[in-house]
Amino acid sequence: MSSSDLLIRSQNLGKCYQLYEKPHHRLLQSIFRGTKQFFREFWALQGISFELYKGESLGIVGRNGAGKSTLLQILAGVLTPTTGAIEVHGRVAALLELGSGFNPEFTGRENAYLNGAILGLSKEEMDAAMPEIERFAGIGDFFDQPVKLYSSGMMVRVAFAVQVQLKPDILIVDEALAVGDVIFQKRCYQRIREMLERGTSLILVTHDTESVRTFTQKAILLNQGAIAAAGDSKSVLNSYQQMILEEEKNYLEHYVAEQLALIDLYEGQQAAYSGNSGARVRDGNEYGTFEAIITKVEVQDKMGRDTNLIVSGDPLRIRITFTVHADLDTLIASVRIRNKEGVKCYAWGTLNQDIRQAFLHGQTSFWGKRFTAGNSYTIEFITEACVLGTGFYGVEALLTKRTDASWHAHEITLHSLHDASFFSVRTDMTQNFFGGVCDLRMKATLLEEGLGRDNNPEPLRMAFQGGKT
């Protein structure tokens, strides 16, 4: 692209903060200046380089504390970089921290005028825009009440309504829309789409990866203040999900190994296991009697490879590996899959399967099988076609035992492990695209005959593949 289309150029950008252990060290630093150092350096950003051109939109993703908000504040002109250079061309509208620039004693209308003046709009321009700002904010009579009475959602409504009146070249949004209700979020995303169609470039920071996938063409993954991946949004989001998966796996492996080492130190452990049916809690993530302990939970694709990304309709495998510390012959293994909101999307276990098999064939696969103390076992759960919708999912693994193989029998939890593993699901828009949390495998049938339409799929197929009809 030509240099005239350049909106942002960041060259080796860095931001360093001085951290002081004690308050009086600040005073000592001002006295001694460069002769002695009373602080330690913390680099929130280091070596950040990228370019953004007209018509492009950029997503910035990363874990909390990765430096995303610091980068946006530099782009918006709120912070100055410590190293490197930043060029920003065109009008910038930034929706950063809630209520930034708002006077709590002023009304929403007065703060709208104040924000418009700060952003460079004249009184006449704001007078003309005010009816639309009031309509879009949609807070009714509160628009003429002091902002200190507003909820966080009302605050962001007014802030966003003012920012979009700028007709900016660059719109910067930093997670602020997350506090709004569903109707307002839908209205905001519709307005963002309209702005993108008019040529506005968007810089979006959010933990909602689907928003990044929808609204941006390219993305940056930040990790500990540095760029870990950059490129098209799809590949960067895949790297982000892989990073999350690796961190969770490392945490789980370290935690399980640590807990197993502690268990080995318990005196009279086997006696305690054989006589104790009461659950104990280790932390908020797991509990149980620990007669059997889950050591690994793996999500695998159709080729049997560890993965964190499943295409809807493809096979999904979940493997649970566990170590048994007491002889068991009524052990039940189960998995629960929850979406990012914590809603249980699916649950299945070896008891479910045994009850079905006993009913259909008069036999079982797991009930009555003896699991011997000191040994490790792996149970694989597999579905030939994952029907979950696009989204991020967590796996909960569970080991229990029952007095008998019925739903009303008394159950004892051996080990319940929340957030045991994670994976994302995406849909193939050319073959099996649907909306919602699961695929009901619906089929449409035309009941009215004689419409005379040419049933030729070729134009539609070419359209989906980007060809001309």
Image (cartoon, rainbow, N blue to C red):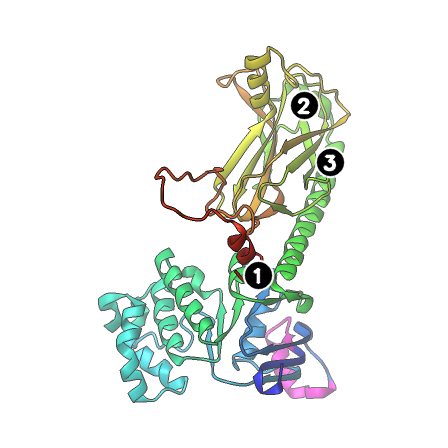
Mark number displayed over residue 260: 3
Residue 60 occupies quadrant: bottom right
Q: How crowded is mark 2: few (under 14 residues within 10 Å), some or many (20 or more)?
A: some
Q: Name the residue under label 1.
A: 467
Q: How far apart are marks 3 and 2 (CA)?
A: 14 Å
Q: Distance between the residues labelled 1 and 2?
A: 66 Å
Q: Position of residue 42 (x, y in %)?
A: 67, 72
| Quadrant of the drawing holding the N terminus | bottom right
Q: Please, is residue 460 above or below residue 398 in the view? A: below
Task: Please report contact status of discs 1 and 3: CB closer than 8 Å, yes or no.
Answer: no
Q: Residues within 10 Å of mark 3 (few under 14, many from 20)?
A: some
Amino acid identity at mark 3 = Leu
Bounds of the magenta span? Answer: 15-35
Marks 1 and 2, the one that precedes in the sequence: 2
Circle 1: element type: loop
Relative side of 362 to 107, left or right: right
Q: Mark 2 points at which residue?
A: 273
Residue 28, magenta (yes or no): yes
Q: Residues within 10 Å of mark 1 (few under 14, many from 20)?
A: few
Q: Which of 311 and 264 is in front in this view?
A: 311
Circle 2: element type: helix
Q: Position of residue 395 (x, y in %)?
A: 59, 40
Which numbered disc, 1 or 2, marks the residue closer to the eye? 1
Looking at the image, the residue that sits furthest to the left is 141
- Observer able to see residue 15: yes
Residue beneath the point at 52% across and 79% down? 76
Amino acid identity at mark 2 = Tyr
Marks 3 and 2, the one that precedes in the sequence: 3
